[in-house]
Amino acid sequence: MRTKRKFIMTFPKDLVREPWNYNLITNFDIIPNIVAGTISEDSAILGYELDGEDAKVTAAISYLQGKGVQVEAVNEIRL
């Protein structure tokens, strides 16, 4: 089943410059959409919508968390 879920993601300093959208598209076949964000040299806080099959979105979230990204599911993105 296809789903669109919203998250607030916090990327620590050492992960800020990674190509996350590319990784999510190529590794999980989902569509990431950054709808809000704050990026500095020390961290990035991004409001993401992830669109794709539910199992793939869940796998992508697990992948991000395993890499050290803090992920919070939300109903509405406000930064």
Image (cartoon, grey):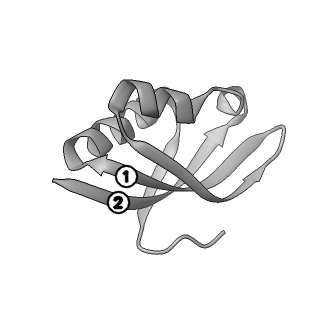
Count neighbours of disc 1 (C-alpha within 10 A) and say few if under 14, some if 14 to 19, many if 20 or more. some
Which residue appears farthest toward the right when viewing the image? Answer: 41
Residue located at (43% from left, 37% from top): 65
Total marks shown come to 2
Q: Position of residue 4 (x, y in %)?
A: 34, 60
Q: Position of residue 55 (x, y in %)?
A: 20, 42
Q: Disc 2 on helix, strand or loop?
A: strand
For mark 2, what is the residue? 4
Mark 2 and mark 1 residues within 8 Å of each other at the beta carbon: yes
For mark 1, what is the residue? 51
Residue located at (37% from left, 60% from top): 5
Mark 2 vs mark 1, CA separation in Å: 4 Å
Q: Position of residue 49 (x, y in %)?
A: 47, 57
User: Where is 58 relative to 64, above or below?
Assistant: below
Nearer to the camera, 37 or 12: 37
Residue 1 appears left or right of 42:
left
Nearer to the camera, 39 or 29: 29
Q: Position of residue 42 (x, y in %)?
A: 79, 39
Q: Which mark is residue 43?
A: none
Nearer to the camera, 76 or 34: 34
Residue located at (49% from left, 27% from top): 23
Q: Disc 1 on helix, strand or loop?
A: strand
User: Where is 79 relative to 52, above or below?
Assistant: below
Residue located at (42% from left, 25% from top): 26
Residue 36 appears left or right of 55:
right
Along the polypeptide, which appears first: circle 2 or circle 1? 2
Q: Amino acid at mark 2?
A: Lys
Which residue appears farthest toward the left when viewing the image? Answer: 1
Within the image, what quadrant is residue 58 found in?
top left
Residue 70 appears left or right of 45:
left
If the image is split into quadrants, where does the C terminus sit?
bottom right
